């Protein structure tokens, strides 16, 4: 959601910024713009639509510059159009600003500026902030840095901003509170971006700006100060991200690449943690907190979207193996109630991006009530990872497709390891089951690989259902959250209405929808609910619904009963979601491609939801 890229140094800024914006396209946006400074002064170019539309707009313009910044906007205040796109000039055009986040008290600031005779060209809160900074700068007589600091002391809300001013072609000022901002430190050059992806091809040295910090880059030097003007010494991290990890590598879409990466990404989530031969399991980030987890009276899991589904899977596993009661909450609901958190409660926050605003706010609330917070994040150094007491990274590698795939299986992998570690410490799992599950975990990558070999068959089924208007997904037990996830994948990228349901619950409502035009995907693997699910399938078939069943290899019963089957290898029931979700990801992908959808950047969705 909103992407920021800025550069100052010796290179051509415009192509670098445009390339960076393309790397951030996955975050989701609806317009794009750049600000450049050269002999012609501070120039802004912006356009509704994709970055390619902005490139066309720049065609033939004088774009030579060694300082510049760019932005992809996901509309919050004002519709997506050329005018509301960022950057925005200030009132006297002395500065330009780009912003990710929301300034909540912008209306009051705007009123005060209107009284002073200001006019506004856009409907955005960002333009108000830019004008406010310029107004302070003009009237206080101090530096721009000071004006930014004073303005941000007044601003309520979340932001990552970057400012360029006509007065100084060597200066970029950036600040953050609640929205991510990374500074790349090169040789006499600096890069700013919402995440490291636009930066890694130039430098691996990055600084993650903290909340309430302002970075001032001027004359080739970087200074970081806090909002109350204390200078801090930033820590320079080495990013491990490789360029190839953020490119498509021969696949048609990032989503397909990420689905096919799962054998590796699941293995990476376990790497160095599981030693099945020795029967040992270590989670470094949990070491000092494992006792607390094992002794906890209750676990509350918070997350959004696919991460919430991973939480639902974890609920079954923690309760089954570690016998700890678990509640799973949408972060957005949790934060706006008065949740009961008692001493000894553990909150696990799950987030691929580590930046989801609602999940971050849920953490802050739980912390204020005394809970210990564990994080399960994919993006290293992200805000959520830094806000938690302990945790385990998923190590799935960058996920670029908006619809989450490999992050889900990595989250489930890590949560399963956490449950196993807690169960072992608590003594609620037998040694033999512990060892058996570790060995089964190690076999999961090969089993997922086997499912991927059925890709062509899944494509044929997808072809038949390309023009369906609705879908129902059914599953029981651990496969119920998988049904929810399968339905979510389909609606996100194909725009077909799809609902996930616990298979037995179908008869309390959705059964009314079933006729010969209703495809029903049923996860009917050979597990403890198998017989019950078969009965549910019969209920669907009796009403002429068309059933696509995900079955266990060697099941000879279901093929004669349903319309289509997709076989998956036999897996221990507790680990089933890691394998059963994969055909559903492929089915959603194929249908979306056949419908001509923009699979990696579906309409209206954002990868990293940094506003509530
Ligand atoms: C957005 C994304 C989803 C993701 C959800 C939670 O809606 O489009 O794919 O599951 O946010 O994101 P998080 O980064 O916290 O896992």
Image: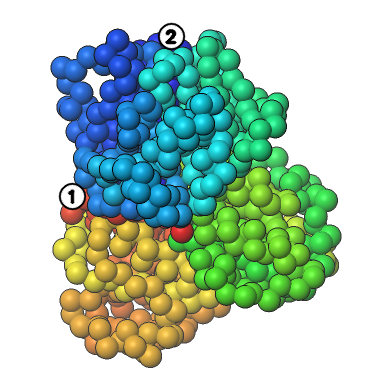
Task: Say if 36 sits above or below 139 in the image.
Answer: above
How many C-alpha atoms fall within 10 Å of the one at disc 1: few (<14), some, or many (≥20)?
few
For image coordinates 74% across by 46% down, the residue present is 285
Disc 1: which residue: 596
For the question of whether residue 362 can be seen, the reply is yes
Mark 1 vs ligand 1: CB below 8 Å: no
Location of mark 2 (residue): 10
Residue 61 occupies quadrant: top left
Asked if residue 375 lies left or right of residue 401, the reply is right
Estimate the x, y position of residue 280 in percent, counting from the top left.
Answer: 78, 50
Please state the quadrant of the image where ligand 1 appears. bottom left
Secondary structure of the residue carrying numbered label 2: loop
- In the drawing, what numbered circle is on residue 7? none
> Which of the two residues, 576 or 311, is positioned nearer the viewer here?
311
SS of the residue under disc 1: loop
Whether the residue carrying mark 2 lies under 8 Å from ligand 1 is answered with no
């Amino acid at each position: 959601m909103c992407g920021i890229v800025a550069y100052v140094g010796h290179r051509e800024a415009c192509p670098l910024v445009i390339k960076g914006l393309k790397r951030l396209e996955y975050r989701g946006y609806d317009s794009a713009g750049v600000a450049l400074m050269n002999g012609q002064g501070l120039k802004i170019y912006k356009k509704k639509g994709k970055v390619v539309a902005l490139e066309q707009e720049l065609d033939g313009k004088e774009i030579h510059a060694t300082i510049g910044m760019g932005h992809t906007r996901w509309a919050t205040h004002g519709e997506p159009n050329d005018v509301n796109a960022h950057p925005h000039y200030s009132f006297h055009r002395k500065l330009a600003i780009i912003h990710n986040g929301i300034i909540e008290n912008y209306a009051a600031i705007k009123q005060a500026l209107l009284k002073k005779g200001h006019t506004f060209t856009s409907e955005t809160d960002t333009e108000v902030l830019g004008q406010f900074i310029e107004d302070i700068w003009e009237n206080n007589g101090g530096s721009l840095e000071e004006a930014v600091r004073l303005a941000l002391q007044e601003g309520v809300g979340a932001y990552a901003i970057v400012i360029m001013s006509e007065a100084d072609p060597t200066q970029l000022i950036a600040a953050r509170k609640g929205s991510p901002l990374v500074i790349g430190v090169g040789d006499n050059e600096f890069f700013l971006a919402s995440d490291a992806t636009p930066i890694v091809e130039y430098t691996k040295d990055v600084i993650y700006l903290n909340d309430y910090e302002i970075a001032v880059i001027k004359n080739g030097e970087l200074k970081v100060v806090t909002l109350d003007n204390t200078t801090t010494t930033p820590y320079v991290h080495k990013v491990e991200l490789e360029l190839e990890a953020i490119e498509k590598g021969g696949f048609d879409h990032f989503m397909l690449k990420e689905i096919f990466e799962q054998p590796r990404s699941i293995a990476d989530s376990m790497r160095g943690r599981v030693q099945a031969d020795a029967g040992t399991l270590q989670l470094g980030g949990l070491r000092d907190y494992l006792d607390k987890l094992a002794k906890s009276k209750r676990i509350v899991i918070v997350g959004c979207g696919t991460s919430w589904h991973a939480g639902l899977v974890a609920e079954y596993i923690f309760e089954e193996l570690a016998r700890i009661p678990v509640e799973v909450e949408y972060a957005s609901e949790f934060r706006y109630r008065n949740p009961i958190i008692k001493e000894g409660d553990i909150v696990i926050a799950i987030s691929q991006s580590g930046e989801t605003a609602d999940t971050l706010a849920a953490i802050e609330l739980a912390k204020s009530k005394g809970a210990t917070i564990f994080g399960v994040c994919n993006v290293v150094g992200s805000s959520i990872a830094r806000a938690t007491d302990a945790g385990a990274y998923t190590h799935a590698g960058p996920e670029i497709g908006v619809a989450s795939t490999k992050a889900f299986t990595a989250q489930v992998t890590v949560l399963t390891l956490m449950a196993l570690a807690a169960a072992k410490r608590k003594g609620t799992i037998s040694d033999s089951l512990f060892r058996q599950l570790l060995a089964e975990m190690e076999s999961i990558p090969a089993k997922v690989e086997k499912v991927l070999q059925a890709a062509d068959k899944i494509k044929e089924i997808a072809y038949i259902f390309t023009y369906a208007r609705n879908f129902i997904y059914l599953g029981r037990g651990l496969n119920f959250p998988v049904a929810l996830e399968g339905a979510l994948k389909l609606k996100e990228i194909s725009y077909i209405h799809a609902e996930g349901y616990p298979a037995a619950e179908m008869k309390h409502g959705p059964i009314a929808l079933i006729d010969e035009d209703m495809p029903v995907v049923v996860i009917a693997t050979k597990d403890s609910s198998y017989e019950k699910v078969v009965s549910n399938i019969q209920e669907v078939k009796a009403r002429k619904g068309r059933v696509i069943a995900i079955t266990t290899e060697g099941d000879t019963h279901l093929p004669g009963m349903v319309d289509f089957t997709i076989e998956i290898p036999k897996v221990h029931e507790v680990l089933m979601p890691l394998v059963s979700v994969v055909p559903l990801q492929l089915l959603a992908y194929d249908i979306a491609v056949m419908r001509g959808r923009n699979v990696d950047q579906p309409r209206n969705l954002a990868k990293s939801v940094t506003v509530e």
